[in-house]
Image: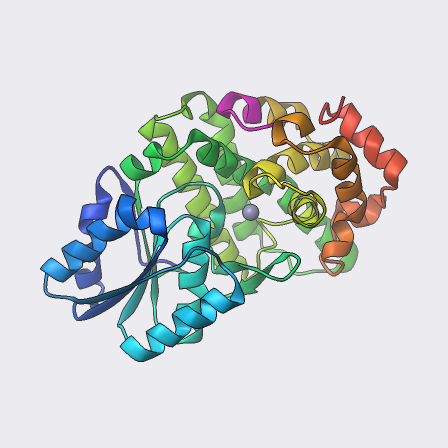
Amino acid sequence: MQLPREVIVGDKTLDLVWDICRRLGFSESVFVITGPSTFRIAGKRAVDSLADAGVNTDHLIVSSSTMWDVRAAEGRIHEVKPQVVLGIGGGTKIDVAKLSSARQGVPFISVPTTASHDGIASPVASIKGLHKPYSIMAQSPMAIIADTHVIAQAAHRLVASGCGDVLSKFTAVNDWRLAHDLKNEYYGDYAASLALMSAMLVVRNAEIIRPGAEEGVRIVLEALISCGVATSIAGSSRPCSGSAHLFSHALDVIAPNPALHGEQCGVGAVMMSYLHELNWRQLRTTLRKVGAPTTAEELGIEPKFIVQALVEAQSIRPERYTILEERRLDSKSAERLARATGIIK
Ligand SMILES: [Zn+2]
């Protein structure tokens, strides 16, 4: 079990990058992976402060998270031989940094600039394949440095998406329990409880998760980080990724213009909660409160793709037993489900 050694969440924590690197013993050489706009927002500040402190600092700018990007990053890490790799940015940069550093046997520090999904703290990297993204076990970040001030400046849509990802843990844990009861799959109560606690945290604090509110951003970050830790403890994404995630992955394949990962997971979780006979109305209300989409229209996805994704979701990852395997929706029952929960009109 690999867990982060330092988790720093707060205002202006970006200024602490050098301190944290030094504390962890990385005071000689650091390699930074960042994106074109995140370099301006946060990457440059970190690179400059490390260089000013006399650290050998190199950086690479990536704009997507394909295997090609990972290999390019690996090449640079192999050449520079840094003590640590910092991933500074939203999802894609952190994914590239996480996987390329793991493959080169170098520790990794996560410096998220958005709170849009739990990849900022989990050991899993999501890499874009030819037709669909796929998940690879990489490594847990050795530290997470999340600057709430920087993250609160980003579009609120990203924070709301993070809430959707966290809320989908309600159904992920129930899918996991189902797989344990019916398929004798390993089930870890501690990891499951941690994922559920994170989801409850968002439900309880939905009122303060508002555009520009740093306090709300902090709650979402803490919840996302706990989810990442739950994945590390379980040794698989089981506590965090179930039927709602399969639905989101299916939309990524089917829909011409998919929405954000967490937005799709949130909508998926409303429908999967209905199937699991959980409190799907409370989940939908929470999504509305935080400003996340709760209908196909708000997702910007045509109803027919919602129905198709429900039907095809389980086939995206057949070995992951979920409520969808039990119910085996056809297009009629899928449409009924989407209508009953108000996702389509
Ligand atoms: Zn997710």
Q: Report the residue at 63% width, 62% height from top.
A: 130
The residue lying toward the viewer, choosing from 175 and 135, is 135
Quadrant of the image occupied by residue 276? top right
How is this picture coloured?
A: rainbow
- In magenta segment, residue 334: no
Q: Report the residue at 70% width, 34% height from top.
A: 273
Q: Report the residue at 15% width, 66% height from top.
A: 55
Q: Measured along the vertical axis of the image, is residue 179 above or below residue 117? A: below
Query: Residue 142: x and y, percent?
Result: 34, 61
Q: Is residue 5 left or right of residue 178?
A: left
The residue lying toward the viewer, choosing from 257 and 262, is 257
Q: Measured along the vertical axis of the image, is residue 1 above or below residue 188? A: below
Q: Is residue 213 visible?
A: yes
Q: Report the residue at 57% width, 56% height from top.
A: 237
Query: Residue 309: x and y, percent?
Result: 75, 43
Query: Residue 49: x and y, percent?
Result: 15, 54
- Write the start and end of the magenta stretch as one range: 286-294
Query: Residue 149: x and y, percent?
Result: 28, 35
Q: Measured along the vertical axis of the image, is residue 115 above or below residue 184? A: above
Quadrant of the image occupied by residue 302? top right
User: How many dots with numbers?
Assistant: 0
The residue lying toward the viewer, choosing from 82 and 193, is 82
Q: Is residue 160 left or right of residue 293?
A: left
- In magenta segment, residue 287: yes
Quarter of the image for the C terminus: give it. Answer: top right
Q: Is residue 233 visible?
A: no
